[in-house]
């Protein structure tokens, strides 16, 4: 016995459109890497009840080479990975370690108190803790029974 499968051309058109949207979004929103500059660091951002937490992966970078700033609702992380060794007679077969400067700006999901922000650097991971502004913290209201 054979199964009959219903052909739905609109479903195929929607999946084609989604694939084209992903292609164009990736082409125009991701930075172009020409191999001459350091790639953008990987970032995780999440929020708890009291804080917005941003974790930035910065292997090989010293904490003194990183600058963090908050302007309005934008968080900017800048830094530079300096080339440590200078080889006079170079004959690279593969060169994937990058060096140079980078800058990454993120839009924060909520208002924060920039003056109370903390940054810690451990094992190549920069953790930025931004306390939420009081007006955006969740408030609990108790219901009284009469």
Image (cartoon, rainbow, N blue to C red):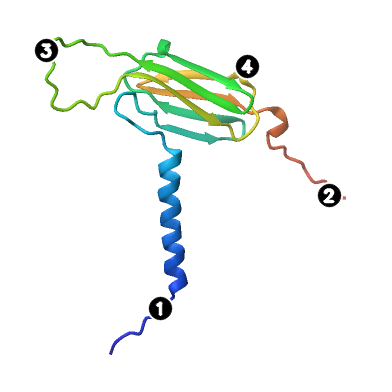
Residue 145's mark? 2
In this rendered view, identify the residue nearer to me: 144 or 51: 51
Residue 117: x percent and y percent?
A: 57, 20
Mark 3 lies on residue: 89
The mark nearer the N terminus, 2 or 4, is: 4
Of 27 and 127, the residue lying toward us: 27
Please report contact status of discs 1 and 4: CB closer than 8 Å, yes or no.
no
Residue located 68% across and 27% down the image: 133
Residues 108 and 102: in front is 102
Callout 3: few (<14), some (14-19), or many (20+) C-alpha neighbours within 10 Å? few
Q: Nearer the viewer, mark 1 or mark 4?
A: 1
Q: Local crowd at mark 1 within 10 Å, few (<14), some, or many (≥20)?
A: few
From the image, state whether disc 3 or disc 4 is nearer to you: 3
Q: Are marks 2 and 1 in contact (CB under 8 Å)?
A: no
SS at circle 4: helix
Task: Looking at the image, tell me whether mark 3 or mark 1 is earlier in sequence order.
Answer: 1
Q: CA distance from mark 3 to mark 1?
A: 63 Å
- Point out the frontmost of discs 2 and 3: 3
Furthest residue in direction right, as rendered? 146
Left or right of 54 on screen, residue 84:
left
Q: In the rendering, which numbered label is found on residue 115?
A: 4
| Label 2 vs label 1, nearer the camera | 1
Disc 2 or 1, which lies upstream in sequence? 1
Looking at this rendering, what residue extends furthest in the bottom direction? 1
Separation (CA) of disc 3 from disc 4: 49 Å
Q: Residue at label 1?
A: 7
- Quadrant of the image occupied by residue 86: top left
């Amino acid at each position: 016995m054979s199964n009959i499968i219903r052909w739905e051309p609109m479903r195929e058109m929607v999946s084609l459109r989604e694939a084209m949207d992903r292609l164009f979004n990736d082409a125009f929103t991701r930075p172009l890497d020409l191999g001459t500059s350091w790639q953008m660091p990987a970032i995780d951002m999440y929020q708890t009840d009291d804080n917005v937490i941003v974790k930035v992966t910065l292997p090989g970078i010293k904490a003194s080479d990183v600058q963090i700033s908050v302007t309005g609702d934008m968080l900017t992380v800048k830094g530079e990975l300096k080339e440590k060794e200078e080889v006079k007679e170079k004959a690279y077969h593969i060169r994937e370690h990058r060096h140079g400067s980078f800058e990454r700006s993120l839009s924060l999901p909520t208002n924060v108190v920039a003056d109370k922000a903390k940054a810690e650097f451990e094992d190549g991971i920069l953790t930025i803790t931004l306390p939420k502004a009081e007006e955006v913290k969740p408030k609990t209201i108790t219901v009284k029974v009469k």
